């Protein structure tokens, strides 16, 4: 029953979605915490968090002079209290790489001196890696994050552009038939 036009449109929709989604799924980013000057005091980490996407598989890179700072991965409560008591992990090499291997909230602060109280802290929400390509369904099983993950997938803008393009083609298809 399908006309050749319909078949063509379906092929175009799939091709556009696949091409635009593929790089979104493949990239795992190294994210330099604090930007080019690294992990330090007197930096707006909330701003930095807002400007970045955090996807499972990405790696946070903390660069600082060893001994001047450290990196504490905290729980929500210990983060709020700037307390190292229940730290999940601590790094102190000055060139610390933390791969974000689970989705959900992660909390970090500097455990040296009063640096945490002085604002050397941030928390992020790590989104599941989602593959948009119809030929490769998502394999992650962290619950509940799918819709958010789509919106925030690596290169979110690119993925969004892919969705927008696919939606546009779909609208054209709907108008044609
Ligand atoms: C994530 O990485 C940490 C540190 O390498 C490891 O201890 C933990 O088991 C990993 N979690 C998962 C879910 O793989
Ligand atoms: Cu510090």
Image (cartoon, helix red, strand yellow):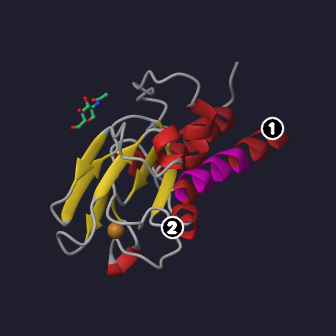
Give the residue pinned by disc 2.
119
Where ligand 1 lies, by quadrant?
top left
Q: Main secondary structure of the magenta part?
A: helix
Q: Nearer the viewer, residue 136 or 169?
A: 136
Q: Tell me: 59 left or right of 6.
A: left
Q: Is residue 176 above or below residue 115?
A: above
Q: Nearer the viewer, residue 127 or 165?
A: 127
Q: Which residues are magenta?
A: 158-168
Q: Is residue 153 visible?
A: no
Callout in the foreground (1, 2): 2
The residue sitting at 45% across, 35% down in the picture is: 103
Crowd band around label 1 with a 10 angstrom C-alpha radius: few (<14), some (14–19), many (20+): few
Residue 174: which numbered mark, if any?
1
Q: Who is closer to the viewer here, 174 or 98?
A: 98
Residue 96, placed above or below residue 4: below
> In the picture provided, is 165 more to the left or to the right than 155?
right
Magenta-span inclusion, residue 162: yes
| Residue at screen point 49% across, 69% down | 118
Q: Where does residue 40 sit, x and y in percent of width and height? A: 36, 74
């Amino acid at each position: 029953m399908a006309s050749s036009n319909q078949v063509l449109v379906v092929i175009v929709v799939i091709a556009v979605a696949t091409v635009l989604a593929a790089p979104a799924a493949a990239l795992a980013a190294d994210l330099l915490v604090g930007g080019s000057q690294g992990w330090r005091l007197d930096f707006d980490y909330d701003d930095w968090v807002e400007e970045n996407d955090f996807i499972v598989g990405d790696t946070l890179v903390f660069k600082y002079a060893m001994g001047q700072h450290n990196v504490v991965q905290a729980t929500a409560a210990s983060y709020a209290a700037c307390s190292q008591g229940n730290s999940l992990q601590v790094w102190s090499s000055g060139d610390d790489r933390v791969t974000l291997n689970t989705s959900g909230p992660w909390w970090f602060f500097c455990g040296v001196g009063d640096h945490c109280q002085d604002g050397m802290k941030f928390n992020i929400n790590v989104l599941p890696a989602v593959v948009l390509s119809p030929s490769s369904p998502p394999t992650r099983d962290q619950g509940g994050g799918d819709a958010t993950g789509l919106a925030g997938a690596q290169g979110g803008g690119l993925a969004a552009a892919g969705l927008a393009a696919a939606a546009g083609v779909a609208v054209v298809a709907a108008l044609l038939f």
